[in-house]
Image (cartoon, rainbow, N blue to C red):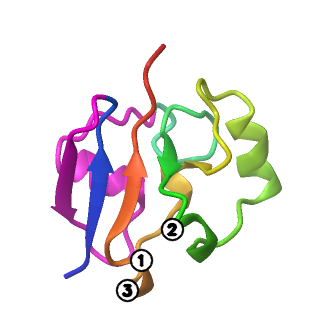
């Protein structure tokens, strides 16, 4: 089983089981992590915005143009911002670390 780490806005880290094939959004929901995902992963909002740890960002598939367009709507955008619904867990991402942005 692969794992990933969610970092809360206050800096608290939470390591969770992260099954291969699930998105970061699905993993968050499975473990009660406060990541909204209003469009349920259909790439129609930016409420699953996460900030990927800079050491992990180069290991991800680059964002599509559609994801980039949605990210433009996200609050607190950073250089390694991504949508959680678009990051699919793989064996190579075991240990992935993402930070949840502040709500405002």
Q: In x, y percent, where is residue 41?
A: 50, 48
Would you place residue 86 above or below residue 91 in this image?
Answer: above
Closest to the observer, 24 or 41: 24
User: Which of the two labelled residues, at mark 3 and mark 2, occupies the earlier sequence position?
Assistant: 2
- Where is mark 2, residue-wise? 56
| Label whose residue precedes the other's in the sequence (2 or 1) | 2
Mark 3–mark 2 Cα distance, whole angstroms, equals 13 Å
Q: Label 1's element?
A: helix
Q: Residues within 10 Å of mark 3 (few under 14, many from 20)?
A: few
Q: Residue 93, labelled with which disc? A: 1
> Is residue 27 shown left or right of residue 77?
left
Sort mark 2 into few (<14), some (14-19) or many (20+) by Cα contacts within 10 Å.
some
Cα gap from disc 2 to disc 1, whole angstroms: 8 Å
Residue appearing at x 22%, y 47% in the figure: 13
- Give the x, y percent position of residue 44: 64, 38
Q: Which residue is mark 3?
A: 91
Q: Position of residue 87 (x, y in %)?
A: 51, 62
Please tell me which residue is depicted at 36% across the width and 36% down the height of the picture: 35
> Image quadrant of residue 63?
bottom right
The magenta stretch is 10-37
Seen in the picture, residue 83 relative to 2 is either above or below; the reply is above
Tell me if label 2 and label 1 are in contact, CB under 8 Å: yes
Front of the two marks 3 and 2: 2
Residue drawn 34% across the image and 54% down it: 26
């Amino acid at each position: 089983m692969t794992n990933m780490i969610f970092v809360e806005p206050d800096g608290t880290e939470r390591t969770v089981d992260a099954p291969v094939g699930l998105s970061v959004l699905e993993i968050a929901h499975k473990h009660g992590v406060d990541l909204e995902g209003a469009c349920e992963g259909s790439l129609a909002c930016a409420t699953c915005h996460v900030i990927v740890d800079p050491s992990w960002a180069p290991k991800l598939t680059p964002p599509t143009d559609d994801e980039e367009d949605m990210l433009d709507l996200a609050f607190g955008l950073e250089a390694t911002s991504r949508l959680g619904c678009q990051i699919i867990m793989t064996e190579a991402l075991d240990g992935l670390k993402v930070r949840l942005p502040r709500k405002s």
